[in-house]
Amino acid sequence: MGVLLVSEVRRIVRSPRFLIFTVGFPVVYFLIFSGLYATGADAAVVTVVLMLNMAAFGAISAAISTGGRVAVERAVGWNRQLRLTPLPGWAYLAVKAGVAMLVALPALVLTFAVAGLVKHVDLSFVEWLRVLLAAWLGVLPFAAIGLLVGTMATQDSAQSMATVTMLVFSLLGGVLIPAEVLPAAMVTVAHLLPSYWLAEVARDQVSGGGVPLQGVAVMLVWLVVAGALVAVRYRRDALRV
Amino acid sequence: MRMTPDGAAVRITGLAKSYGPVRAVDGLDLTIAPGEVVALLGPNGAGKSTTIDALLGLTRPDAGEVALFGRSPREAMSRGSVGAMLQSGGFPDDITAGELVRLSVALFPDPLTPAEVLRRTGIADVAGQRFGRLSGGQKQRVRFAVALACNPDLLVLDEPTVAMDVAARREFWASMREFTADGRTVLFATHYLAEAEEFADRVVLLRAGRVVADGSVAQVRALASGRVVSAVVPGADEGALAALPGVTGVAAVGPRTRLTCDDSDAALRALLASHPDAHDVEVTAHGLEDAFVALTAESAVATETERV
């Protein structure tokens, strides 16, 4: 499994698109938005919020687009090929989820690094660590959601399905637009999405707010439901041929 | 060679698989002993791919049993006893040939070394290239490399030399000979009858999901009995030629006339007597291709297996 994981990561890092979209975009967005909005008395707070939201955006898109690649691999017959090896089906999916988690890390780390070095976000080492860990664990539901996209989409629709999924979660979850400016009904929706809680739980690590149970529950439900659907889809896929 | 509880490398009994109303495989039995090199032949839709899929545990048969070295396909696969090269099996375009080989080697319990795999399949020079950028023939060799990585006792190949040019095909079969020299088993499906003729110890002919002929190349070839008399016959009249003794069929092939005969001696005497100016005469035995056409034609009696 380790060798498969390494080869998967190497393949992704080799594609320039990955670097531009999942690492470049969040950093650039953060710099632009913090330049525009982080002014006045609450500049420091706004900068932290923007840092977390943009990092979350990058991590979500990295995780979902990684899962979406499964659709292409299904189309070319890579899964079929792997079924000729001792590797069980669940291990393939586990490796894919692991890859999604790994490629989400650079978006988080780089956005944090730029925020700290360029925008002088001043957190203690422990705070940085807690923020990073909280945000990273928050990516888990999206690793599963990405796999679901990958097991449902066709080769042709995978790219657009992944983009739409990522945008829906980012917009409705208040990652691209702050949830505070949304109408009340939309806030209710946001509170049911793992994208909202990804950024929120991370933010609580800065403001010393602990870990909100509602957030953990929402993220767990998404993780379990999406994971179960992936298993069902994958089994059906394997039996069909 | 690993010990095999029932002695057979492949044992398929009563295999049946339907896709909707289509019976792809219809009660197929096949036993292959260790060390045999067997060609699986048949027209498109004869059930070759379905048989191979069932053999590898990629499809669940409606009925019947498949055992590889006395084990289930999945179990044999996990032990690395079986290497397969599929037409439908694909690799992502962005993985390099070398990565594929290293990955394949790493997944199995008792593999060859990556260097050995690269050498045997002649892809060392393209190891750093991405799969998507290789030529059709190179891709086939990479598929072969992946099949070989587990150091299998049984190799299953579906159309292995498709997309290869003549030289590549020769090299491929040369490396295959190296593989079978130490008594390993090979089952390959092919459209190139010449390959079956040249490389297989045994030919299994499928039609409509059943085995219609099974034997050595010579035996199967002999099933389309008789010989072909071919000559340039000025003023040839098909009706008159067909009426000659010993002739069962007449066909014009370019300037030549081809007489299919059940008694070529009688046919030849009669031909020369009735057409004294017939020249460039050749008498040949049927090839595997003639047997193939005769045995798999729509009109052929499919219910009776030719036991040879």
Image (cartoon, rainbow, N blue to C red):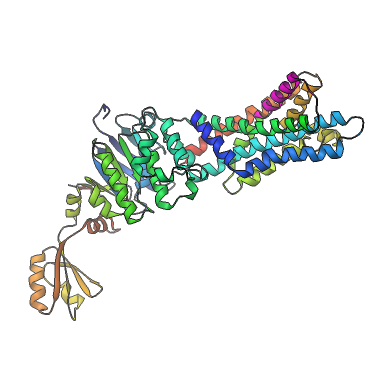
Position of residue A161 measured from the top left corner of the image (x, y, whole percent): 65, 44
State the image quarter where residue A209 is shown: top right
Q: Is residue B298 visible?
A: yes
Q: Residue furthest bottom?
A: B235
Magenta stretch: dominant SS?
helix
Does residue A42 appear left or right of residue B277 in this picture?
right
Choose between A149 and A177: the one closer to the eye.
Answer: A177
Residue nearer the viewer, A136 or A219: A136
Q: Nearer the viewer, residue B252 or A96?
A: A96
**Residue that sits furthest to the right in the current view:** A41
- Asked if B11 appears above or below B251 in the picture, the reply is above
Q: Quadrant of residue B299?
A: bottom left
In percent of width and height, residue B74 lies at 39, 31
User: Relative to B302, is A167 above or below?
Assistant: above
Q: Residue at x 11, y 65 (%)?
A: B264
Q: How many marks?
A: 0
**The magenta segment:** A121-140
Residue at 51 percent of width and 39 percent of height: A237
Residue B184 in the image, given as x and y percentages of width and height? 26, 36
In the image: residue B58, left or right of residue A158: left
- What's the residue at 52%, 44% (across, down)? B94
Decide: is B226 above or below A213: below
Q: Is residue B304 magenta?
A: no
Q: Residue furthest front?
A: A117
Q: Is residue A126 magenta?
A: yes
Rendered residue at 29%/43% (across/down): B176
